[in-house]
Structures are given as C-alpha cells and as structure tokens.
Amino acid sequence: MTFVREAMLVAGKDLRIERRSRVALQQIVPFGGIVVLVFAFALDSDRTLLSRAAPGLFWAAVLLAMILAIGRSFAVEEANRARDGLRLSGLDGGAIFLGKAAAVAAELLVLEVVVGIAVVVMYDVTLRGALVLVCAGIAATVGLAATGTVYGVLAGGLRARETLVPLLVLPAVMPVMLGATRSFQAALDGAPGDAWPWVQLLVAFAVLIVAAGTVAFGPLLEEA
Amino acid sequence: MRVIRLRSAVCTLGRFPALAGVDLDVDTAEILLVSGPNGAGKTTLLRLCAGLLPLRAGTAEVLGVDLATDRKRIRRAVALVGHETFCYDDLTVVENLRFAARAAGRTAADADAAIERVGLARVAHVAHGRLSQGQRRRLALANALARAPRLLLLDEPHAGLDEDGRAVLESVVRGAPAEGCTVVLASHELDLARGIATREVELIAGQVRAAAVDAPRTEVPV
C-alpha cells in the first residue's frame, strides 16, 4: 500500500469513528458555539468592540475546540490499546500522522463554518475578502491540526495527557493565532493586500509542521 | 528455519527487568507454550517478539530480523493476541477487521474470512463496544488471523472464552503449522494449553529456568 493510501486509510478510520460516535458533532462543535456565545455575553455592552475583536474571538473559539478534538483523536487510540494495534499494523508513522491530522483538520473545517456563522450573526460582522478568508482559514486549520496531532501523540501515553496537551499546544500555535487573526482582520477591514503576508506566514508554518510531524510522529508513537 | 532466536535477551519495564537474560529458540511451525507464574515475564516476552518493546541487552532475532536495530520491520508478519483487542469501540466487527487487514497489506476478503472462521458472522455489524467479553476475545483472534501472520503470539488466549470459543481457538492453533505459521502462547490454563502445544518452556523471574520439555505431541490436521 502506498504512503498516501495508508494516510487515507487512517483518516477514513478516524472520520468513521467520529461519524459513528458523533462526539465532534454533538460536543465539540456546540462547544465552539458556546465559546462564541460566552464572548458575546462578556463584551455585549460594546458592539463595536465585539465586531472589531471578531477575528481573534473566532480563532480563540476554534483553538479551544481544537484541544477537545485532539484529545478525542488520541483517546480512541488509548481504549483497548488500539495504539498498539496501530503500531503492530506496520503502517508508516508519517502516514498515520497525516491521516490523523487530516481527520482533525476536516472536523475543524466543519467547526469553523458553524462558528463562523455564529460570529457573523452574533457579532454583527460583514464578510469581506472571501479569498483571503478561505486561504487563511485552510492554512491555519492545517497548521492547528498538524501541531495538535504532534503534541497529542507526545502526551498520548501519559496519565496527565488531558491537562498536558493544552499546555504544550497553546504556546506552539501562537504563530497560527497571530497570522490567522491578522489576516482575517485585514480581510474584514477591506484591505486584503495587508493580509497576504500573514497568509504566507500561515502557509510556511503549516508546511514546516506537516514536514516535521511526518518525520517525528513514528518515533514519538514508539516512545510515548 | 528458526523463527525466534533470543540470547541473553533483556527487556525492561521502566527500571524493572521483566526479562533478565532469556535464551530461547523457536522453529518454524512449532506451537510453543510459555508457562510460568504471574509476573514471570510472559507478556513481556510476547511483546518483545512482536516488536512492541525495545531490547535493552542481549540479542534477539524474529523471522530473521534483528530486533535491536529494526523491530518495526517484523510487525506486518507478526500478530499478537493480548489482553486487549486493539480495536475501536465505535467501529463494528467488520470495520475493525477490514481496517486491520488493509493496514497489514491484506484484503477485505481476508477480514471477512477471519470473521467466519471465529464464528462472529452473526455480530459482524455490531460495534466493538457492544460485544460481550467472549466475543471480544474471538474478535482479537480474528484480528490476528485477518493479517495472515507468520508468527502468532497468544497471551492467555483461553481467558474469557466459552466452550465453543475454546474449540475455535484450538482449531486455529492446531491448524497454524499447516499454514506455515508458528505459534507461541503464554497461558495459565496449562491443561488446555498443553493439549495443543508441541513444546513447553517455563519462565520464572524473567528467565527460562526450566529446560525445554516436550509437551504431549498433538496431531496437526491435514
């Protein structure tokens, strides 16, 4: 089986599990919506501030929900020692990484659509710069999913993984938060030209973390 | 051909030497019973041979592969039936097995045949999380069979199986040599295990203490 087919096999397995369990749909996506709602309540007295801060609040909501998605992605590997089955399968570590990251990215994209609609409705945001929003959104999502997957496997074998993953992931994805927020802000302000350098940062980060994860995931899976 | 060759093999769990210098040879198509008390290192021995645990000292070769340098390379040729099923609760029996089979380079038909062989066809579309303990044990065995391994490692394979399940297990193990598969099983159910093993070694405190003794020979069905 080719490397790509192996990755698709793992991604298909993870997405099938999520479709069956509906944890992503019934818990993680609503969680993202609730975070948006919480911010709306917290800043309700100042509609202008809410609208200005919308890009940052949107990505903060996505980031928090991503922590749950990563936890879920590796929790299914711990039950019944499925992680050992994955190791015994002979699948390439890099392919397992790409498959798991792709599944998380797919879940995040669905989440972003839902949270995005909530932000537009609740924060009174006018959408502009669709191309920038889509490009930045995809690059940021890949970066978030890949980073989360690397740190997820790192913490996977530890008892304190639920609390350790946020501690490890949140500082590591600060470049994504910065780039995604700034590019969204520029697009919504009607200055897409200012957004592209940030989109380039997001793409560079995504490429680097995907490459690093593809190389490092196999050894991390063995050691964790 | 020698399938397993261990010399002074040491394997640690944390700092504890679960295997403290094991010497063991297993040849093709043997059915080896590893007996010994709790904590003797039986599970560790099987996990080492599956390439799941690193070798700390000594030498170890499985299917001609040096475990000290490339233990991942043997995994597609080895199947381990452990205390857990290695399956996903939210996937059905058939989905779990097809994933395992495809990951090991086999086909969906291999997975379906394994389901039939262990008698799980009736629950093929039931999620793993809803299976009984006995059905899970059968699924673990099917998971191994779907990979068509050259070395089958069984850790307490009789546990949780009913009479019918034990008959299935016995049939699989007895039939393995005819398929070119070598079997190593660790068990406390010695009466049952000795009935199907062709040889027995005893593991005590991480070492093969007793000299290899021949278990009662059994006929291999043709």
Image (cartoon, rainbow, N blue to C red):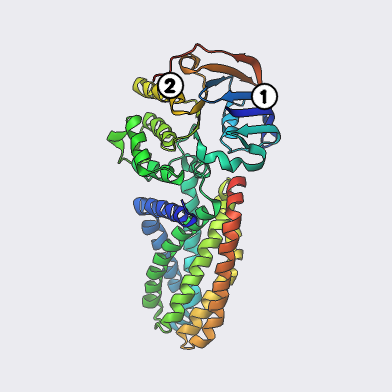
Q: Residue B36: horizontal and vertical position, in percent? A: 59, 19
For label 1, the crowd category at 10 Å Cα-Cα, with few meaning under 14, some 14 to 19 and many 20 or more, is: some
User: Residue at horizontal 56%, vertical 35%?
Assistant: B50
Q: Are marks 1 and 2 on the same chain?
A: yes
User: Farthest residue in the front direction?
Assistant: B1
Report the front residue among A192 and A164.
A192
How much space separates mark 1 and mark 2, taking CA atoms? 25 Å
Identify the subunit bearing mark 1.
B
Q: Quadrant of residue A41?
A: bottom left
Report the front residue among B111 and B134.
B111
Determine which residue is flagged by label 1: B23
Residue B60: assigned label = none
Residue type pointed to by label 1: Asp
Up/down of B210 relative to B206, above or below: above
Q: Residue A67: horizontal and vertical position, in percent? A: 51, 59
Up/down of A174 relative to B34, above or below: below
Q: Quadrant of residue A152?
A: bottom right
Q: Horizontally, is A112 left or right of A87 in the view?
A: left
Identify the subunit bearing mark 2.
B
Determine which residue is flagged by label 2: B174
Q: Residue B68: horizontal and vertical position, in percent? A: 67, 39
Judged from the image, the secondary structure of the residue bearing numbered disc 1 is: strand
